[in-house]
Image: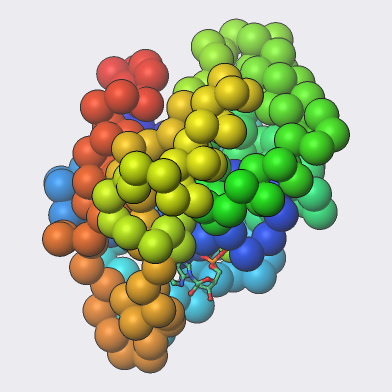
Amino acid sequence: MVYRWALISQKPGVGKSTSGIFLAQALYEQNHNPILVDADKGQSAQDWDEQAGGMPYPVISKAVRQLHRTLPEAVEGRGAVVIDVPQVEDHEPIAKGAMIFSDTWIIPIAPSPVEVTRLFRDDRFTDFLRDMQELRQEVGKSEAEVVFLLTRTNTSKPTKGGPDTECRVELEKHGFPILQTQIPFNDHRYRQVGGSRVRALGTPYERAAKELIASYSPGASS
Ligand SMILES: Nc1ncnc2c1ncn2[C@@H]1O[C@H](COP(=O)(O)OP(=O)(O)OP(=O)(O)O)[C@@H](O)[C@H]1O
Ligand SMILES: [Mg+2]
């Protein structure tokens, strides 16, 4: 197994499933032989798979606890695993297994400083991430890479002083890295449209995947 990525968020509706589909597609287009694991009972990834007429990589549904125990067998032989994890605030036990299994935790967030402030208002989320890192240590795993992904931004490139930049500054204050690549708001491209094929080529997700591979995929040889 080379790349093990999980899409994580405290709250729902931040772009996990969309990012999961497009990142897995990018991995596929870059010949990394991915599998997408839909760990959300809401089954957005599964729906997308159906509506797109079948993704060119497998999408499996596994909304269960203890993913770190069952996934190794289920994904054997694949070059990359992307997990669409349900929001932590309601599904902590499922998130835990996914986070022990994955080496990279990708946290999509809307580029609103209010969102960032809200996320760090109390220590719940940061404590949870720290507890999960400790749990990994206990089972003999190295620390996971944690990286934020700005989605639904106004622009595709970081601005000089827009809300995306304010978010970046705020997240950095809390010690978190952010992908240089950001995903602009694009209703047409990211809305699930029945029958339309998904392509990552030429979208920011293609660059996001490359950045994740280059800088946020520890132990990529194990
Ligand atoms: N870059 C984008 N531009 C425009 N719309 C987007 C973008 N990314 C996601 N969306 C839309 O935002 C909504 C939420 O996205 P998505 O389903 O990926 O989030 P999620 O975190 O998986 O949500 P949930 O927690 O409910 O599973 C969807 O309707 C999706 O089509
Ligand atoms: Mg989802």
Residue 76 visible in the snapshot: no
Q: Is residue 86 above or below residue 2?
A: below
- The quadrant where residue 44 appears: bottom right
Q: Position of residue 103 (x, y in %)?
A: 48, 27
- The quadrant where residue 56 appears: bottom left
Q: Position of residue 183 (x, y in %)?
A: 36, 56
| Quadrant of the frame with the N terminus | top left
Q: Position of residue 92 (x, y in %)?
A: 78, 43
| Most distant residue in the bottom direction | 194
Front one among 130 and 148: 148
Front one among 102 and 125: 125
Q: Position of residue 100 (x, y in %)?
A: 61, 28
Front one among 22 and 51: 22
Q: Is residue 208 above or below residue 110?
A: above
| Most distant residue in the front direction | 161
Front one among 145 and 172: 172
Ligand 2's quadrant: bottom right
